[in-house]
Amino acid sequence: MQAKPCSQCHAAKVLIVDDHPIIREGLANLLNLHEDLHVCCTAGSADEALEQMACEPDMAIVDLSLHTDSGLDLVRTLRQHHPCLAILVLSMHDETLFAERALRAGANGYLMKLEATEHIMRAIHEVLAGNIYLSAAMHGKLARALTVPRKCADGAVQSLSEREFEVLHLIGLGFSTREIAGKLNRSIKTVETHQANIKEKLDIPNGKELMRFAIQWIENQ
């Protein structure tokens, strides 16, 4: 979708980044119903998103899973090159696992796609207003994290790269190496390399122990 003139100069310009065309179109239609919002451009990949920044959006709504790209890496790049851009992550990924990492990458808010329309609109307006937006449950989790010391395992997990973190998450959900490769659009060999790196960083001796750790880690979130 190419940039087009905004009919109302006071409307905030929004870039939507999602690799599913039907999601991009549906979200664009929803936002364009509001006089204070205008979807100026959309993108299905990180490269397209960076190209579409030429339309100078006020806000980017970014999915975490972008086929071959990492949404967290895109958020980090956007924040680095466009420090004033409002960024909202809208994803299917569990917020209890990914919201904090998204904020650390530079996002101003995190919302799951299963949320009601009114929550999505509230998140958009909050982020555009310069506020941080998280669900009430996630606010509570982060507040508790500030008062309770992190476990050693949590600290080690934070050392993982974004892709390694995704692999660990999928292992904990019970997906096989082949299934993870399919979900991330990577080769089995690449996923096995990520698994090896995770085991080394977390000091885990074998695949069986890695699966046990991943499952327990998710259950404790």
Image (cartoon, helix red, strand yellow):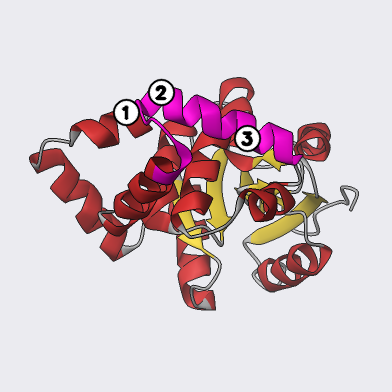
What SS does tag 1 mark?
Answer: helix
**Which residues are drawn in magenta?**
187-208
Q: Residue 42, percent across and down?
A: 79, 51
Tell me if residue 88 comes above or below residue 105 in the rendering: below
**Residue 22 visible in the snapshot:** yes
Mark 2–mark 1 distance (CA, rounded to whole Å): 7 Å
Point 56% across, 62% down: residue? 92
Left/right placement of residue 145 relative to residue 176 reads left
Depth check, front residue: 44 or 165: 165
Query: Where is residue 50 shown, x and y percent of the image?
Result: 77, 32
Residue designated by label 3: 192
Q: Residue at x 81, y 34 (%)?
A: 47
Residue 9 visible? The answer is no
The main secondary structure of the magenta stretch is: helix
Circle 3 SS class: helix
Q: Which residue is mark 1?
A: 156
Which amino acid is tagged 2? Lys
**Amino acid type assigned to the residue bearing label 3 in the image:** Glu
- Residue type beneath disc 1: Ala
SS for dot 2 = helix
Image x and y of residue 157, in percent? 36, 33
For discs 2 and 1, the disc positioned in front in the rendered view: 2
Tag 2 near tag 1, CB within 8 Å: yes
Left or right of residue 170: residue 217: left
Q: Magenta includes 192?
A: yes
